[in-house]
Image: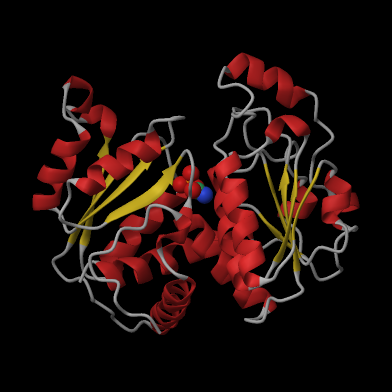
Amino acid sequence: MQTELRGRDLIGDLDFSREEVETVLEVALDLKRKRALGEAHPYLRDKVLAMLFFFSSTRTRGSFEAGMAQLGGHAAFIESKTTQIAHGDTPKEIGEIFGRYFDGIAIRHVDWGIGNQYLNDVARNSRVPIFNMQCEIYHPFQILADLLTIVEKKGRDLRRKKMVVSWAYAASYQKPISVPQSLILQMPRFGLDVVLAHPPEFKLMPEIMDEARRQARKYGVGFEVVDDMQAGFKDADVVYAKSWGALLATTDQEEGARIIKKYESWITDERKMALAKPDAIYMHPLPADRQIEVSNAVIDGPQSVVYDEAENRMHVQKAVMALTMH
Ligand code: CP
């Protein structure tokens, strides 16, 4: 168990070593058990977390806020548009000033080419831990929750299990690429053979792909890219299919929408799920475009674990906060 986590930031998925992530999972399971038993666990009494949002959220906001309260502390919800950031507060000032008010600063900023830099600029100037509630490159807390969910459903020995991370059609908007990128970085460290499936225009960042290949080599697991959803789903133990934008091809919303429209057939439905193993689980971070990205029969069906994933956001976040903010 690696317990030297006090004061640490979590911005990218690999900021914590594999052993440190194992510690997070162990603590998360302990906190989940304590909550189920109604056992108080006020490890962060009187501590306050700032939650700075540049983009909307349901699960991330709710789970961080509830988690801090359950740990005996408080979370302050701050929307960037209600601050003076637009009038000149710099990331340095946010780091310096919020670092003096709060015991941790969590930030969601998904603007392309801006968000991750913003988090790192705040982190450089903050005396307290910085948590990435999603930027345009990474969504590390989502992936910790996904990993905990996979361990709960498939056991701790994930070797020779196949996970497909697939693009799926959704018309609502060009969604960030941070979830698939974080998945292909983290999952190889835990033994899963990862297959990434997407149409040609939906490539991920080359440096992330290179790092995912390096992780797969290091941990002796498979990492393959295919451009066919069915091929990706075949014999999978874990199906993780969600939409993301063609952001490496274009950041223009209209052009992106035109590209997305070409791939309406990339829906997760019962026919495609039948290609996976009979006991495969279906995962999605939510929100999903129902009946477009995934059929109701799948997302509400027996293989779906989407609500467990959403619940586990809270447990892994509490674990990271308890380990870093005390
Ligand atoms: N999965 C996730 O991050 O959900 P929200 O966007 O609602 O926070």
Is there any visible trace of residue 53 in the rendered image?
no
Q: Nearer the viewer, residue 274 or 326?
A: 326
Q: Position of residue 318 (x, y in %)?
A: 35, 68
Q: Position of residue 104 (x, y in %)?
A: 22, 56
Total numbered labels: 0
Image-based side of 208 in relation to 1, left or right = right
Q: Position of residue 16 (x, y in %)?
A: 41, 66
Q: Position of residue 55 (x, y in %)?
A: 40, 35
Q: Residue furthest top?
A: 254
Please tell me whether residue 12 is drawn above or below residue 252 in the rendered image. Answer: below
Image quarter in which the C terminus is found: bottom left
| Residue lying at 23% horizontally and 65% vertically, measured from the top left | 7
Residue 167, quarter of the rendered image: top right
Residue 141, quarter of the rendered image: bottom left
| Residue lying at 71% horizontally and 68% vertically, measured from the top left | 221
| Residue lying at 59% horizontally and 27% vertically, measured from the top left | 173
Image-based side of 103 in relation to 163, left or right = left
Please tell me whether residue 267 is drawn above or below residue 21 in the rendered image. Answer: above
Is there any visible trace of residue 197 in the rendered image?
yes
Please tell me whether residue 108 is drawn above or below residue 142 in the rendered image. Answer: above
Image quarter in which the N terminus is found: bottom left
| Residue lying at 64% horizontally and 29% vertically, measured from the top left | 246
